[in-house]
Image (cartoon, rainbow, N blue to C red):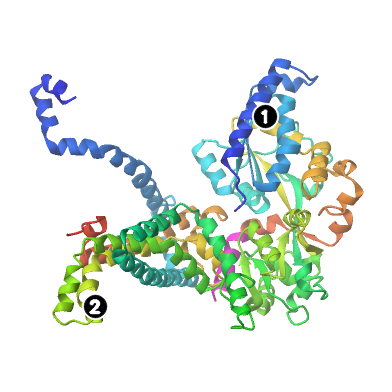
């Protein structure tokens, strides 16, 4: 997905993890009962790499390793296919995995994930939208309309999906992601469907609306790096984009803006492959990682995603909170992707999408 | 080693001394690696596509009855043919010039081509984006000289894909053609011209036919590689430049439909083998492995 940074960092982490772990064993500190239990164990965490995994490393992974004296080995680039391969062969590469919703939905359908042990993982302060049988949300993120402010040259920017569809009123090259999920929802919103009445999707209506804009989309992007590159170079004036990536670009001084209105709220989830022998430690890691303080630190300092622990906002300054997808004002303008709709529908609608694309 | 075994039993010694057996031993590690890393997974894919869990042709029937997959198959073949052709033209010219260049210049060029193998595919694709995009190098230069008013659309269409893939494939044609040309006696061209042939006639009736084995080997290699390509079409192509490998990847990673993905892979393999068979029939594959006559 263009966000792997891979080997050197992993090796570095393995080394530092071992060193800090060893030091902690020697010091044998901390009043926690669990601490002694976990000492010397190894946990393998897989996430999506890039600035995102870096935020997890600083706010969640390293503190967990330090506190419990656990050695953590990181990997990047998870997908449900590799989880299936691990579960089928009982040869586990990963203990805890960060996965996107569509993978979680598939994983639950195919019985590839371990149900959450609620006696270990404290879900009491977690947003209801972020709780599933086999996974708990770790961030809210949004796919929404974004544009290059500078390239607009002072013209009024599009402020909704209806504007995005209005190629005469808001001229300029446009980009969308090459996939059915989100785009069908955006099309329906542009066509006037209220955001709380999107599901189940009116497939025919969505594609009819998509037909209108098909030839005006100059790029159908495939990965996270591409969307930002397109917007930054003004190859596309408007594009759907992930809010976290846009925020990172903004912080680097790129003149990008995003439109919360009509954004698709989605989650990344922590989960554990079915039958993983290390699942007890994995559950403990998840409980630690979704605690208010950890999420608060992660979102305040390192990445602009939304916490799933409702108490985490206590640790986030008001200014920062406004830039996060789950900030109440932003939340009101968005809809949540319905994972249970997409779970069984992903295959047929993907095929329909691909057929539509080449015709 | 030989001496020691000789002193044991006569039987074993004679086995050791048989050259066939010793060659076989030399090949064994490669053979084991091939069986383990290639034949075994391939057979698993075949099995997965035909058994679910009992024997079924369901996946294949679905492939051939759905309009999507047949279309994408044709797009794949068309794009592969197109890039093979452009790579052939550029690669051939390159090899032709190199054959006749002074050794110093030739080595510099050969090194440059070799170097391109060491640059990651992604880096090369993204470089093309910077060159070809709306505000990219080509459009800026053309606009500077007043040759165009509006930026040309060079990216996210068939043109972009062909450029990107050709860039990657040219060495795979240039090297085989070059090696065949190196084995060719340039005096033949002089002889032809001496006998009254024009430069054009010399090329078409002497040099070109002699370089055919290189052309065949290079094009086959490139065409087969192109059939399985997916990163370049995904990054430089538009909505219509979908290759079969892109669809296979989505079936494997997102939809977890491994039986169908296996069937698609098998079909792609069969197409490849078919082309290989045709080639072998008419040109002979031994030329692929550098069977250059001097």
Q: Is residue A16 magenta?
A: no
Q: Residue at x 22, y 66 (%)?
A: B283
| Left/right of residue A155 with respect to residue B153 in the rendered view | right
Helix, strand or loop at mark 2: helix
> How far apart, in angstroms, are the residues tagged by discs 2 and 1?
72 Å
Pair 2/1: label in front: 2
Q: Choose between A58 and A149: the one closer to the eye.
A: A149
Location of residue A33 in the rendering, given as x and y in whole percent from the top left corner: 76, 20
Q: Residue at x 42, y 51 (%)?
A: B48
Are tags 2 and 1 found on a single chain?
no
Q: Is residue A349 magenta?
A: yes
Label 1 neighbourhood size at 10 Å, few (<14), some (14-19), many (20+)? Answer: many
Residue A293 visible, this angle: yes
Question: Relative to B186, is A212 above or below?
Answer: below
The chain that hosts pointer 1 is A
Label 2 neighbourhood size at 10 Å, few (<14), some (14-19), many (20+)? Answer: few
Q: Quadrant of the C terminus of chain A?
A: bottom right
Location of residue A338 in the rendering, given as x and y in whole percent from the top left corner: 72, 57
Helix, strand or loop at mark 1: helix
| Left/right of residue A140 with respect to residue A351 in the rendered view | right
Location of residue B82 in the rendering, given as x and y in whole percent from the top left corner: 41, 72
Location of residue B5 in the rendering, given as x and y in whole percent from the top left corner: 15, 23
Question: Relative to B132, is B201 above or below?
Answer: below
Q: Choose between B70 and B101: the one closer to the eye.
A: B101
Q: How many numbered discs sit on the rendered protein?
A: 2
| Mark 1, residue position | A281
| Mark 2, residue position | B204
The span picked out in magenta is: A345-359
The chain that hosts pointer 2 is B
Which label belongs to residue B275? none
Q: Main secondary structure of the magenta part?
A: helix
């Amino acid at each position: 997905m263009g966000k792997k940074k891979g080997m050197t960092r992993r090796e570095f982490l393995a080394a530092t993890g071992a060193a800090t772990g060893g030091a902690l064993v020697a010091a044998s500190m901390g009043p926690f009962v669990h601490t002694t239990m976990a000492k010397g164990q190894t946990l393998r965490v897989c996430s999506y790499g890039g600035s995102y995994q870096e935020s997890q490393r600083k706010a969640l992974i390293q503190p967990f390793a330090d506190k419990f004296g656990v050695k953590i080995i990181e990997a990047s680039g998870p997908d449900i296919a590799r989880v299936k391969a691990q579960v089928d062969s009982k040869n586990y590469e990963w203990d805890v995995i960060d996965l996107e919703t569509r993978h979680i939905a598939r994983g639950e359908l195919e019985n590839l994930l371990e149900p959450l042990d609620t006696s270990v993982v404290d879900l009491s302060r977690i947003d209801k939208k972020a709780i599933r049988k086999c996974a708990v949300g770790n961030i809210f993120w949004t796919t929404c309309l974004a544009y290059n402010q500078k390239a607009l040259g002072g013209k009024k920017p599009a402020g909704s999906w209806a504007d995005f569809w209005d190629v005469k009123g808001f001229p300029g090259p446009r980009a969308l992601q090459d996939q059915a999920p989100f785009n069908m929802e955006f099309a329906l919103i542009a066509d006037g469907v209220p955001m709380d009445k999107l599901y189940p999707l009116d497939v025919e209506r969505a594609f009819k609306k998509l037909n209108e804009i098909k030839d005006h989309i100059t790029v159908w992007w495939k990965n996270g790096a591409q969307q930002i590159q397109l917007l930054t170079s003004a190859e596309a004036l408007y594009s759907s984009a992930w809010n976290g990536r846009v925020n990172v670009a903004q912080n680097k001084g790129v003149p990008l803006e995003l439109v919360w209105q009509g954004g698709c709220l989605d989650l990344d989830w922590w989960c554990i492959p079915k039958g993983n022998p290390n699942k007890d430690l994995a559950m403990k890691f998840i409980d630690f990682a979704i605690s208010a303080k950890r999420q608060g630190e992660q979102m305040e300092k390192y990445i602009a995603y939304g916490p799933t622990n409702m108490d985490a906002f206590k640790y986030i300054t008001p200014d920062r909170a406004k830039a996060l997808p789950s900030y109440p004002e932003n939340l009101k303008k968005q809809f949540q992707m319905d994972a249970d709709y997409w779970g069984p529908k992903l295959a047929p609608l993907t095929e329909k999408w691909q057929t539509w694309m080449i015709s | 080693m030989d001496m020691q075994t000789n002193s044991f039993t006569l039987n074993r010694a004679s086995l050791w001394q048989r050259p066939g057996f010793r060659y076989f031993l030399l090949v064994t590690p490669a053979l084991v690696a091939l069986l383990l890393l290639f034949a075994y997974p391939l057979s698993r894919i075949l099995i997965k596509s035909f058994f679910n869990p009992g024997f079924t042709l369901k996946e294949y029937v679905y492939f051939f009855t759905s309009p999507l997959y047949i279309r994408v198959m044709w797009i794949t073949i068309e794009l592969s043919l197109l890039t093979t052709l452009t790579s052939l033209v550029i690669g051939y010219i390159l090899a032709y010039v190199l054959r006749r260049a002074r050794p110093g210049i030739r080595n510099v060029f050969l090194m440059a081509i070799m170097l391109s193998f060491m640059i990651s595919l992604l880096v090369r694709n993204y470089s093309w984006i910077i060159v070809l995009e709306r505000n990219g190098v080509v459009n800026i230069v053309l606009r500077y000289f007043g040759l165009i008013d509006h930026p040309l659309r060079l990216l996210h269409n068939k043109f972009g894909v062909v450029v990107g893939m050709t860039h990657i494939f040219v060495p795979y044609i240039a090297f085989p053609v070059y090696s065949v040309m190196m084995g060719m006696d340039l005096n033949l061209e002089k002889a032809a011209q001496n006998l009254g042939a024009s430069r054009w006639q010399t090329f078409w009736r002497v040099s070109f036919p002699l370089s055919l084995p290189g052309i065949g080997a290079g094009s086959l290699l490139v065409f087969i590689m192109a059939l399985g390509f997916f990163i370049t079409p995904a990054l430089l192509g538009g909505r219509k430049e979908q290759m079969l490998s892109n669809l296979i990847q989505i079936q494997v990673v997102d939809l977890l439909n491994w039986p169908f993905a296996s069937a698609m892979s098998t079909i792609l393999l069969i197409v490849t083998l078919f082309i290989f068979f045709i080639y072998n029939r008419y040109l002979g594959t031994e030329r692929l492995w550098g069977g250059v006559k001097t």
